[in-house]
Image (cartoon, rainbow, N blue to C red):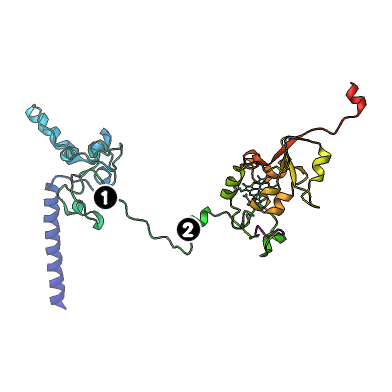
């Protein structure tokens, strides 16, 4: 028991002496930026203003001041920020935007020759003087099952509102797999309402046919009244006529060539087809397509003799 007490006292004395010596030597050391003011060196890259600079950096600022006062000559001052003068400017991108280490007042970290610069974050940099950044990493591969492909994004949606694109889904023309009444165009359901044209009835075939001559079915240019037009429905052995901007066309020869199907084209038989035509495909040039089918012009019904006298 007595031995323990003595030993404890000796230990305490030794600690006191050791602490006293340490404190003395610390006081003799020049003061150092304390942990209470770390902003001037690490956490803040901006230079402190003059007032705070003196408070926070006693060693760097006060020591050169003393030297100047003693010898009266202009001794170069020690400035922590001059260290960055050795650092050449470098760019962060290949464009016009240049990031200059000196302008931004960034401490030279990591050192020029450090391994950290040579291999930033595991990537290999060819040269420390290169002004080019390493290429960006490739994006993660897209899950093809989830992401829509380019072709499917270009596809016309089968749902949602669409302009009138052919016969309704339930119509006979779309659903029937048999040949059309005259056995030429086969109806095939598709989003745009186009039909499968029978061999020899492609748009190219039609283009070749209209070059051959007159397809109007009449001799000479006709004057057609509305009542006459109304009778040309394409039924009961009569041709199908339709008018467009005051001109009358024989649409019968075009029926098997019509990409939208015969039934659709027949909707404008015996009447003015402009409205229906423009609803479906305003980009199609009626006059070019049916130029060789021109029958004549639409004229008013014959006027009564009394009106003629006026
Ligand atoms: C009488 C004059 C007409 C001509 C010269 C004509 C010509 C054409 C042409 C060239 C196409 C192919 C369009 C393309 O590929 O972009 C087409 C498609 C079509 N036409 Fe006509 N057409 C006429 C009248 C009509 C009428 C009156 C209707 C409907 C009532 C109609 C309904 C369609 C449909 C549904 C298509 C397929 C869908 C589409 O191409 O947008 N056509 N027509």
In percent of width and height, residue 184 lies at: 66, 58
169 versus 90 height, above or below: below
Left or right: residue 284 versus residue 136 is right
Query: Which of 61 and 22 lies nearest the eye of the viewer?
Result: 61
Which numbered disc flags the more N-terminal residue, 1 or 2? 1
**Dot 2 lies on which element?**
loop
Residue 37 shows up from this direction: no
Q: Residue furthest left?
A: 71
Using the image as rendered, state which of residue 4 and residue 99 is in the foreground. Answer: 99
Measured as percent of width and height from the top left, residue 243 is found at 74, 40
Q: Give the range drawn in magenta.
A: 181-185
**Compared with residue 210, is residue 310 higher up or lower down, i.e. above or below?**
above
| Residue 212, quarter of the rendered image | top right
Dominant secondary structure of the residues highlighted in magenta in the image? loop
Horizontal relation, residue 124 to residue 168: left or right: left
Identified at 14% across, 77% down, the residue is: 2
Q: In which quarter of the image is residue 176?
A: bottom right
Label 2: which residue? 149
User: Distance between the Cα atoms at labels 1 and 2?
Assistant: 30 Å
Identify the residue under disc 1: 134
What is the x, y in percent for residue 215?
67, 43
Give the quadrant of the N terminus.
bottom left
Side (left or right) of 15 relative to 142 = left
Q: Where is residue 218 in the image (x, y as percent from the top left)?
A: 73, 41
Identify the residue at horizontal 70%, vertical 46% (top origin). 251
56 in magenta: no
- How many marks on residues? 2
Disc 2 residue lies near ligand 1 with CB under 8 A: no
Q: Residue furthest right?
A: 306
What secondary structure is found at the residue carrying circle 1? loop
């Amino acid at each position: 028991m007595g031995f323990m007490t003595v030993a404890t006292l000796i230990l305490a004395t030794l600690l006191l002496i050791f602490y006293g010596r340490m404190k003395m030597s610390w006081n003799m050391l020049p003061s150092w930026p304390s942990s209470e003011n770390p902003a001037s060196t690490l956490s803040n890259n901006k230079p402190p203003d003059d007032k705070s600079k003196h408070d926070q950096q006693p060693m760097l600022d006060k020591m050169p001041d003393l030297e100047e006062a003693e010898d009266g000559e202009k001794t170069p001052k020690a400035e922590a920020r001059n260290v960055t003068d050795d650092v050449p400017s470098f760019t962060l991108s290949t464009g016009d935007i240049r990031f200059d280490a000196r302008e931004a007042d960034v401490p030279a970290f990591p050192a020029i020759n450090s391994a950290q610069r040579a291999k930033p974050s595991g990537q290999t940099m060819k040269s420390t003087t290169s002004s080019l950044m390493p290429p960006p990493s490739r994006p993660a591969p897209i899950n093809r099952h989830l992401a829509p492909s380019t072709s499917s994004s270009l596809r016309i949606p089968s749902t949602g509102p669409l302009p009138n694109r052919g016969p309704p889904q339930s119509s006979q023309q779309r659903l029937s797999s048999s040949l059309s009444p005259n056995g030429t165009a086969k109806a095939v359901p598709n989003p745009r309402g186009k039909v499968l044209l029978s061999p020899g009835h492609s748009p190219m075939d039609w283009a070749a046919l209209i070059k051959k001559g007159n397809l109007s079915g009449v001799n000479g240019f006709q004057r057609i009244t509305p009542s006459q037009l109304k009778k040309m429905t394409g039924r009961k052995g009569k041709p199908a006529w339709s008018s467009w901007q005051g001109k009358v066309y024989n649409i019968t020869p075009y029926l098997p060539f019509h990409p939208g199907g015969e039934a659709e084209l027949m909707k404008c038989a015996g009447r003015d087809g402009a409205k229906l035509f423009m609803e479906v495909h305003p980009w199609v040039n009626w006059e070019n397509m049916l130029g060789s089918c021109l029958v004549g012009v639409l004229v008013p019904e014959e006027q009564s003799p009394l009106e003629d006298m006026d």
